[in-house]
Image (cartoon, rainbow, N blue to C red):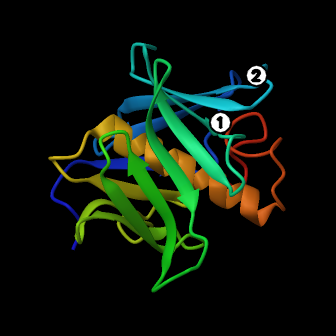
Amino acid sequence: MPPTGHTYVLNQKLLSLSGDLWIEDEQGNNAFQVDGKAFSLRRTLILLDPSGNPLYAIGKSLAHLHRTFEIKRSDAVVATIQEALVNFLGDHFTIISATGDQLSVKGNFIDREFRVSRGGADVIVASRKWLAIRDSYGIQIAPDFETALGLAIVVALEQMELEEREGHNAGSGLLGGFLPGF
Protein backbone atom coordinates (compact mmCIF):
# COMPACT_ATOMS: atom_id res chain seq x y z
CA MET A 1 0.00 0.00 0.00
CA PRO A 2 1.53 3.35 -1.01
CA PRO A 3 2.07 6.11 1.53
CA THR A 4 -0.81 8.55 1.78
CA GLY A 5 0.92 11.60 0.41
CA HIS A 6 1.00 13.63 -2.74
CA THR A 7 1.81 11.96 -6.04
CA TYR A 8 4.57 13.36 -8.24
CA VAL A 9 5.12 12.46 -11.87
CA LEU A 10 8.53 11.77 -13.28
CA ASN A 11 8.60 11.69 -17.09
CA GLN A 12 11.59 9.67 -18.17
CA LYS A 13 11.94 11.32 -21.56
CA LEU A 14 10.90 14.90 -20.86
CA LEU A 15 13.79 17.17 -21.75
CA SER A 16 13.53 20.80 -22.64
CA LEU A 17 16.03 22.53 -24.91
CA SER A 18 17.76 23.93 -21.84
CA GLY A 19 18.44 20.42 -20.52
CA ASP A 20 16.09 20.61 -17.55
CA LEU A 21 13.79 17.89 -16.25
CA TRP A 22 10.63 18.88 -14.43
CA ILE A 23 8.95 16.72 -11.83
CA GLU A 24 5.23 17.50 -11.84
CA ASP A 25 2.67 17.38 -9.06
CA GLU A 26 -0.60 15.46 -9.39
CA GLN A 27 -2.27 18.47 -11.08
CA GLY A 28 0.41 18.62 -13.79
CA ASN A 29 2.18 21.69 -12.38
CA ASN A 30 5.97 21.94 -12.37
CA ALA A 31 6.83 21.13 -8.75
CA PHE A 32 10.60 20.50 -8.82
CA GLN A 33 13.31 20.85 -11.42
CA VAL A 34 16.34 18.63 -11.94
CA ASP A 35 19.30 20.46 -13.43
CA GLY A 36 22.29 18.53 -14.74
CA LYS A 37 25.59 20.28 -14.21
CA ALA A 38 27.36 19.01 -17.34
CA PHE A 39 30.34 21.30 -16.75
CA SER A 40 31.11 19.53 -13.49
CA LEU A 41 33.98 17.05 -13.57
CA ARG A 42 31.86 14.63 -11.54
CA ARG A 43 28.41 15.03 -13.06
CA THR A 44 26.09 16.50 -10.47
CA LEU A 45 22.34 16.86 -10.53
CA ILE A 46 20.72 19.69 -8.62
CA LEU A 47 17.15 19.41 -7.37
CA LEU A 48 15.61 22.88 -7.48
CA ASP A 49 12.34 24.28 -6.21
CA PRO A 50 10.02 25.88 -8.83
CA SER A 51 11.69 29.27 -8.28
CA GLY A 52 15.10 27.84 -9.14
CA ASN A 53 16.48 27.67 -5.59
CA PRO A 54 18.81 24.71 -5.05
CA LEU A 55 17.57 22.14 -2.56
CA TYR A 56 19.85 19.12 -3.00
CA ALA A 57 22.92 18.14 -5.02
CA ILE A 58 23.01 14.52 -6.18
CA GLY A 59 26.25 12.96 -7.35
CA LYS A 60 28.47 9.94 -7.45
CA SER A 61 30.88 9.55 -4.56
CA LEU A 62 34.40 8.63 -5.56
CA ALA A 63 35.41 8.06 -1.93
CA HIS A 64 33.83 4.58 -1.78
CA LEU A 65 34.95 1.33 -3.37
CA HIS A 66 31.38 0.22 -3.96
CA ARG A 67 29.01 2.21 -6.20
CA THR A 68 27.73 5.03 -4.02
CA PHE A 69 25.82 8.28 -4.54
CA GLU A 70 25.56 11.15 -2.11
CA ILE A 71 22.79 13.66 -1.62
CA LYS A 72 23.99 16.97 -0.20
CA ARG A 73 22.30 20.08 1.12
CA SER A 74 24.81 22.90 0.74
CA ASP A 75 28.06 21.02 1.41
CA ALA A 76 26.68 18.63 4.01
CA VAL A 77 25.92 15.01 3.07
CA VAL A 78 22.34 14.27 4.14
CA ALA A 79 22.06 10.77 2.63
CA THR A 80 24.35 8.15 1.15
CA ILE A 81 22.95 5.54 -1.22
CA GLN A 82 24.95 2.40 -1.76
CA GLU A 83 24.26 -0.58 -3.96
CA ALA A 84 23.71 -3.67 -1.82
CA LEU A 85 26.76 -5.90 -1.65
CA VAL A 86 24.47 -8.91 -1.59
CA ASN A 87 20.91 -8.77 -2.91
CA PHE A 88 19.27 -10.16 0.25
CA LEU A 89 15.50 -10.65 0.02
CA GLY A 90 15.25 -8.14 -2.82
CA ASP A 91 17.19 -5.27 -1.18
CA HIS A 92 18.93 -3.50 -4.03
CA PHE A 93 20.25 -0.43 -2.23
CA THR A 94 20.81 0.83 1.27
CA ILE A 95 20.30 4.48 2.16
CA ILE A 96 21.87 5.94 5.29
CA SER A 97 20.79 9.43 6.35
CA ALA A 98 23.02 11.87 8.22
CA THR A 99 20.82 11.25 11.27
CA GLY A 100 21.65 7.53 11.13
CA ASP A 101 18.30 6.35 9.77
CA GLN A 102 18.64 3.37 7.45
CA LEU A 103 16.26 2.88 4.54
CA SER A 104 16.00 -0.16 2.31
CA VAL A 105 15.06 -0.20 -1.35
CA LYS A 106 13.26 -3.14 -2.94
CA GLY A 107 11.51 -3.65 -6.23
CA ASN A 108 11.71 -3.94 -9.97
CA PHE A 109 13.63 -0.98 -11.38
CA ILE A 110 13.17 -1.95 -15.03
CA ASP A 111 9.40 -1.67 -14.62
CA ARG A 112 9.71 1.30 -12.21
CA GLU A 113 7.92 -0.50 -9.40
CA PHE A 114 9.94 0.00 -6.22
CA ARG A 115 9.63 0.95 -2.54
CA VAL A 116 11.88 2.72 -0.07
CA SER A 117 11.16 1.66 3.50
CA ARG A 118 12.23 2.83 6.94
CA GLY A 119 11.68 0.43 9.82
CA GLY A 120 9.37 -1.70 7.68
CA ALA A 121 7.10 1.20 6.66
CA ASP A 122 7.11 2.54 3.11
CA VAL A 123 8.22 6.17 2.88
CA ILE A 124 8.56 6.32 -0.94
CA VAL A 125 6.68 4.23 -3.49
CA ALA A 126 7.19 4.49 -7.24
CA SER A 127 4.85 2.88 -9.76
CA ARG A 128 4.01 3.04 -13.45
CA LYS A 129 0.62 1.48 -12.70
CA TRP A 130 -0.80 4.75 -11.37
CA LEU A 131 -0.36 6.59 -14.68
CA ALA A 132 -1.49 6.06 -18.24
CA ILE A 133 1.25 8.39 -19.52
CA ARG A 134 3.91 6.60 -21.53
CA ASP A 135 7.46 6.77 -20.16
CA SER A 136 6.28 8.24 -16.85
CA TYR A 137 5.68 6.92 -13.38
CA GLY A 138 4.19 8.15 -10.16
CA ILE A 139 6.07 8.73 -6.94
CA GLN A 140 4.31 8.93 -3.58
CA ILE A 141 6.11 10.14 -0.49
CA ALA A 142 4.83 9.61 3.04
CA PRO A 143 3.63 12.82 4.74
CA ASP A 144 6.22 12.41 7.51
CA PHE A 145 9.12 12.19 5.02
CA GLU A 146 10.56 15.32 3.41
CA THR A 147 9.23 15.50 -0.17
CA ALA A 148 12.30 17.10 -1.76
CA LEU A 149 14.64 14.59 -0.12
CA GLY A 150 12.38 11.73 -1.26
CA LEU A 151 12.50 12.98 -4.84
CA ALA A 152 16.28 13.45 -4.64
CA ILE A 153 16.55 9.81 -3.52
CA VAL A 154 14.46 8.67 -6.50
CA VAL A 155 16.61 10.71 -8.93
CA ALA A 156 19.79 9.21 -7.41
CA LEU A 157 18.36 5.68 -7.67
CA GLU A 158 17.45 6.32 -11.31
CA GLN A 159 20.98 7.47 -12.08
CA MET A 160 22.49 4.45 -10.33
CA GLU A 161 20.24 2.07 -12.25
CA LEU A 162 21.01 3.82 -15.54
CA GLU A 163 24.74 3.49 -14.94
CA GLU A 164 24.26 -0.19 -14.17
CA ARG A 165 22.30 -0.79 -17.38
CA GLU A 166 24.79 1.16 -19.48
CA GLY A 167 27.85 -0.50 -18.05
CA HIS A 168 28.79 2.10 -15.44
CA ASN A 169 29.15 4.84 -18.05
CA ALA A 170 29.39 7.90 -15.80
CA GLY A 171 28.91 10.26 -18.74
CA SER A 172 25.36 9.16 -19.38
CA GLY A 173 22.13 9.49 -17.55
CA LEU A 174 19.60 12.11 -16.56
CA LEU A 175 20.08 15.35 -18.47
CA GLY A 176 22.97 15.81 -20.86
CA GLY A 177 22.90 12.12 -21.52
CA PHE A 178 21.07 11.73 -18.27
CA LEU A 179 17.51 11.12 -19.27
CA PRO A 180 16.98 9.05 -22.40
CA GLY A 181 16.55 5.65 -20.92
CA PHE A 182 16.49 7.27 -17.45
Of the image marks 2 and 1, the number of the one nearer the N terminus = 1
> Considering only vertical position in the picture, is 171 above or below 141?
above
Please tell me in which quadrant of the rendered image residue 17 appears: top right
- For image coordinates 39% across by 20% down, the residue present is 50
Q: Is residue 120 shown to the viewer in this render? A: yes
- For image coordinates 43% across by 64% down, the residue present is 132
Q: Amino acid at mark 1?
A: Leu
The residue that mark 2 highlights is 40
The residue that mark 1 highlights is 15
- For image coordinates 22% across by 48% down, the residue present is 6
Which is nearer the eye, 21 or 154? 154
Few, some or many residues within 10 Å of mark 1 (<14, 14–19, 20+): some
> Considering only vertical position in the picture, is 82 above or below 86?
above
Dot 2: what SS?
loop
Which is nearer the eye, 17 or 96? 96
Query: At which x and y percent is residue 139?
Result: 36, 55
Dot 1: what SS?
loop
Q: Quadrant of the N terminus?
A: bottom left
